[in-house]
Amino acid sequence: MTAELVRGQNHPLTEVRLEIRVSAGTPLVAAATLGDENGKVRGAQWVVHPGAPALPGLEVPRQAAAGHRLALDLGAMPEAVHRVSVLLALPAPGPARFGAVAAPFVAVTGLDGTELAGYTIIGLDAETAVVALELYRRQDAWKVRAVGQGYAGGLAELLADQGLSEARHLAATVEEAVARGLARSVAAPPSRTADGDRSRHTAPAAPGPDQTGPAASSASSGRQTVPDTAPAQPATPQDGRTNAAPGQPAPQPPYADNSGPQPPYPDGALRQASASGPQPPVPATGPQPSAPTRGPVDYTHPRRQSSAPPPPPPTAPPAPPGQPAQPVAGDATGWSMDERLYNQVWGMFEDLARTTAAYRSAVDFADSRREKELDQALSDPRSRTGGQGEAAREAAHARYTALVDQARMALDRDLAQLTAESEVVEPALPPAFARWDNPVWHGYRVPMEIPMAVRLGDLNLPENPSLRIPMLLRLPLERGLWIDSGRSASSDDDVFADEEELRRLAMEAAVAHAARLLAVHPAGEFGVHVIDPAGAAARTLAPLVRSGVLAGPPAAGAAGVADVLGRLTQRVDLVQMALRGGAPDALPPGFDTSEQLLVVNDFPHGFDDRAVNQLRYLADEGPAVGVHLMMVADREDAGAYGPLLDPLWRSLLRLTPVPEDHLADPWVGHAWTYEPALVPAGSRVLEQVLAQVAEARREWNR
Amino acid sequence: MTVNLTKGQAISLQKNDGGSLAAVRMGLGWQAAPRRGLFGSRTREIDLDASAVLFADKQPVDVVFFRHLVSDDGSVRHTGDNLVGGAGQGGDDEAILVDLQRVPVHIDQIIFTVNSFTGQTFQEVQNAFCRLVDETNGQELARYTLAGGGNYTAQIMAKVHRAGTGWTMTAIGVPANGRTFQDLMPAILPHL
């Protein structure tokens, strides 16, 4: 049970291994002092700070940060220690006083994350350092007390007050350590991107047995040139737009296309990346009414929280010993249920990729070992006669089977766990993440805000095709989409050989994706344009056209193509100019700044050279200013352009209308079978959803 | 309690209660080089790197080092490259975490190494150490002091290998020379 402490209040602690979590709106320095039974700090060696971040049982971060987790093991403390004071201080380059920033929040949690006590340090003004909490020993039991004693003179004054003679020197040491920490850390990103995706461009693969991978050579040549920051986001031109969401956490790496260039490998698990990702919205309480004697007038309600800390994520109930915990939907980090589910899905994706990698690696090894042993048995002249060779062969087979069985057991254990997780996660998904057959679509309402991501299909691996991971794509889209209506190598021989059928399926998938994108955006924030030069897809497009959700009727003929492309090109150009000039307000009045999606069927039918160039311009420049492309095309049709269009195809994310293994994960690069998210046959859900979207658009336009 | 291992000494990673060890961490810490002269930016930084090589029957299968931070199967994770070291106060500047229960079945040995990427020998590095820690309870299993260790740029630390159903750790502590773990492969092989 969480106890919300007020200043001076204490609370018993039942555990000795604890975590102290600090969240604040601005980077803070965390430190701690240890005191003996008289409360006396026996010297600098009893102060834990960024310059000396560890003592037995206690560690503090080296850097100033808006969020901290201090690991604390009271049981490991020296006997003489009777008191631990947790200190927070504002680092030198930053806000000059606590009164100018949101009130910091500290919580004492158990190792499993359950919050035992929390305390919002309110009422600070000119102080720059504060004793936040005190943990103290009473008759061999530990308690925590909310202290909240601030010091305007900073750490030096605070430490001096604790009886340290060398307080000033120590405070200077801390300051230097923090400055060093700052110099080492990556420059603060404009949005939450770099924080959330702290990835590093790593070598594409670990060197194999021969030890001469590309990693080997590049490692010894010029490591320092490797960019150390997260994959660069296309700056943040979106910040100027009304519908941009600067508060959204980092985009995850795009799904890689096996045929295209591989994306950089993100190093850490996404589960971890997200854990350190978005900084908490601050549990801000305004200063006490009596506090502000100086400074600007404070208009905030003294007791209203401008944003509450997020509700704690659902945690799995404790598992019986020896068994994995029961999975729970949303059992991941994040500031909203959507974000948690998103992170959980990515976690499942990575776990499945890795456990399969372990299995495949083991089977490969077993294979090569058997080969070697059989070769040996054959080359040994003694074994050619008699039963010896036979016995050797059998032994080799037995060893092979034993290892593969073991590997399969480990894989099956993991698959069972992931399947169980998938079974609880799928029903809990919001519409944007859910399959079309999920009942959540029947209760669909037009959303008020743009979701984090949208599901475009499912991914599975041949080891267990029934375990399907949602393929979630971040919004706003970063690359265009290409729904390949051409025949691919793997579909040569099967029932999809019929080209017309394939084209129809591709357009069906495109309609499903476009409808989903429309449905998950608030009314009026997403427009869909369609180019269908020959009217070939009129029947498939009917649901979109009939419900009236399109920006206009599908453009037909060369004139229609030129018109739509011309308008969108001009729009991209205008928005770009406005953003580059730093004057997004200068756009013409009534200018529609919503996201736009252009669906192009039958490319390059109806396209002249000018139109092709415009299309390429849109593909390159559009995503950054909210104009996206969805090509429904067979690459062969544009074969006359030769290699000129290769960059265009490469810049698009290729999806298929039928299941095909062409997508690679960013961790180990398995080929995943992609299955598009299609509306089940006979289902009316698409029409129902589109009718609601159309209704909301009419209201919005009014 | 730290067990200061001597060369070749093996300790079993079984817990006292019979359960086997679930996770180990190899930690590496060293002190940043002191600033020299008037130009503070022209420091001679020291970059030590921790690596782990995963072997299946003496064949290297996967490597975890600063360019490949997570083994493909996800069981071995490097916490990230540190290019300059820390304050030398005892914290780990680089760490490699091994989830022994998730190590693929065919991997039977994991070798831990330390290299000086910037080429300083351990004689020149201050307060450098590496240690193996039982990640579940923070207990230090083994510790080596690298500083003043001699005219070497690398050390093959230890190996963790399967023994029966559990794992055993053997201290190796053999000095070697090399910039990254690749240079150490010939030196590693005799210890498999």
Image (spheres, coloured by chain):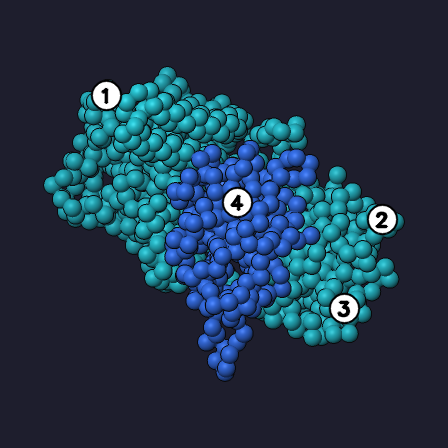
Chain colours: A cyan, B blue
Number of the front mark, 4 or 3: 4
Horizontal arrangement in the rendering, residue A258 relative to residue B17 (left or right): left
Identity of the residue drawn at 37% across and 51% down: A203
C-alpha separation, residue under disc 3 versus residue under disc 2: 24 Å
Residue B47, percent from left and from top: 47, 64
Identity of the residue drawn at 53% across and 65% down: B149
Number of the front mark, 2 or 1: 2
How crowded pointer 3 is (Cα within 10 Å; few <14, some 14-19, many 20+) is rated as: some
Per the image, the residue denoted by label 4 is B160
Q: Amino acid at mark 4?
A: Val
Mark found first going from the N terminus, 2 or 1: 2
C-alpha separation, residue under disc 2 versus residue under disc 1: 74 Å
C-alpha separation, residue under disc 4 versus residue under disc 3: 40 Å
Number of the front mark, 2 or 4: 4
Total number of numbered discs in the rendering: 4
Per the image, the residue denoted by label 2 is A140
How crowded pointer 1 is (Cα within 10 Å; few <14, some 14-19, many 20+) is rated as: few
Per the image, the residue denoted by label 1 is A494
User: For the C terminus of chain A, which image quadrant?
Assistant: top left
SS of the residue at dot 1?
loop
Mark found first going from the N terminus, 1 or 3: 3
Residue A525, percent from left and from top: 42, 42
The single residue placed furthest to the bottom in the displayed view is B38
Q: Are marks 1 and 3 on the same chain?
A: yes
